[in-house]
Amino acid sequence: MLKGKNIVVCVTGGIAAFKAVSVVSSLVKLGAAVDVIITRHAAEFVTPLSFRSITKTPVVTDMFEEPKVTEIEHIALAEKADLFLICPATANIIGKIANGIADDMVSTTVMATRAPVLICPAMNTNMYENPIVQGNIERLKSYGYKFVEPDSGRLACGTEGKGRLPEPYGIVRRVLMEIACEKDLNGLKVLVTAGPTREAIDPVRYISNGSTGKMGYAVAEAAALRGAEVTLVSGPVSIEPPLGVEVIDIISAEDMYRAVMERESEFDIIVMAAAVGDFRPESRAENKIKKAAGPPEIKLTQNPDILAELGRRKNRRALVGFCMETRDLLESAAEKLEKKNADIIAANNLNTPGAGFGTDTNVVTLLFRDGRDRMELSGSKAEIADVILTEAAKLLSK
Ligand code: CTP
């Protein structure tokens, strides 16, 4: 995802500097060419050699023991970078950049770049909340510098509060948001539903299905990476929420119906990837049903069909549904396209190897309402998500 991208990672002195090693390692694995600049203080916490072993590139440092790189090359670094990542960023480096001080390798090179700069502050809570630091952060934001908010929690100094460097995973995903894709969905609002719903029988039991949410989450993440403003209405799943996406957690089909209908009119593209339960128990037992009374008879009633209701309120937006079957896939998908007034149905067969719940891949046929030829797709859920979004966005420009 980062092939062909040049990232300069600046590591400044704090206990969180060790996390920069795994950030750099992930960026390299994603295909980026990474140069590391490390301050003298950071080198007290983590060695240049750790970074050099991962990037296979000399580390730029203020320390003379490391292979020397000339001043001109630092400017070259500043010029070739697609992104500067300062991770972790101390109060000191934030203060220097905000005030135009360039007295070491990091501050000098950052000053010389026109690339976007993403700053990950990490420090003691009182330092972070200090009005001088906050003022510097605000000033930098006003110049277009971007920040990764620190996490709250127990800090190395023993105090609790805001100031901890987020886990490497979150930082890497933020880098992806900044530079991984062309922002061709900028300005569009995308609503995605994902995961299963749970229909309660009693306080401890429910009817549900095997959806893990992976397909819908992949669509939401792809849309966000491509610059869309994304809302994800999600049933109960155990995967990480995509970065940069507003997540609305729901439990039942009726919850999902309400969450979607409250907002639907704002969106340009709606993708219904959720495996919405068609039926729910007519009533939910107030207390746990006891086995002694014998197997209960559970009367079911129909849930609202969210996609069909969206189809009725369609306007000019692009509406995408999914169709998961175990037989007669294409007939059934064509019928749903028609009946639910969707523009695109992504049809997949649960029994096809590499398709269905829980896998990282999918095998999908796209059916289009405008009479275009069907499209056969197979690949990672992320790749399929991209095609679905591209096709949905094309409908908007018609
Ligand atoms: N869907 C929905 N609301 C429901 C059921 C389904 O919005 N109550 C949406 C799904 O999110 C999906 C599409 O409709 O995008 C098709 O879902 P699917 O379960 O394949 O079809 P159903 O309409 O439930 O029909 P059947 O179960 O008879 O195949």
Image (tube, rainbow, N blue to C red):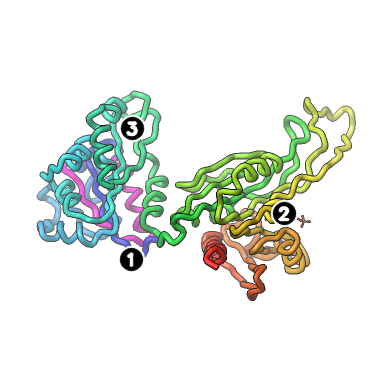
| Amino acid bearing label 1 | Gly
Magenta segment: 17-41
- The percent position of residue 346, horizontal first and vertical second, equals 65, 63
- The percent position of residue 14, horizontal first and vertical second, equals 25, 36
- The percent position of residue 119, horizontal first and vertical second, equals 29, 44
Would you say 235 lies left or right of 139 here?
A: right
Pointer 2 residue Cβ closer than 8 Å to ligand 1? yes
Q: Which of marks 1 and 2 is in front?
A: 2
Query: In the image shown, does 82 or 98 lie closer to the viewer?
Result: 98
- Residue 330 lies, with reference to residue 115, above or below; the image says below
Query: In the image shown, does 293 or 133 lie closer to the viewer?
Result: 133
Q: Residue 163 carries which label?
A: 3
As measured in the structure, the alpha-carbon distance from the residue carrying label 2 to the one carrying label 3 is 46 Å
SS assignment at label 2: helix
SS assignment at label 1: loop
Q: How crowded is mark 3: few (under 14 residues within 10 Å), some or many (20 or more)?
A: many
Of callouts 1 and 3, the N-terminal one? 1
Residue 79 sits inside the magenta stretch: no
Image quadrant of ligand 1 equals bottom right
Q: Kindly identify which residue carries mark 1.
A: 4
The image quadrant where one finds the C terminus is bottom right
| Amino acid bearing label 2 | Ala
Point 73% across, 64% down: residue: 338
Of callouts 2 and 3, the N-terminal one? 3
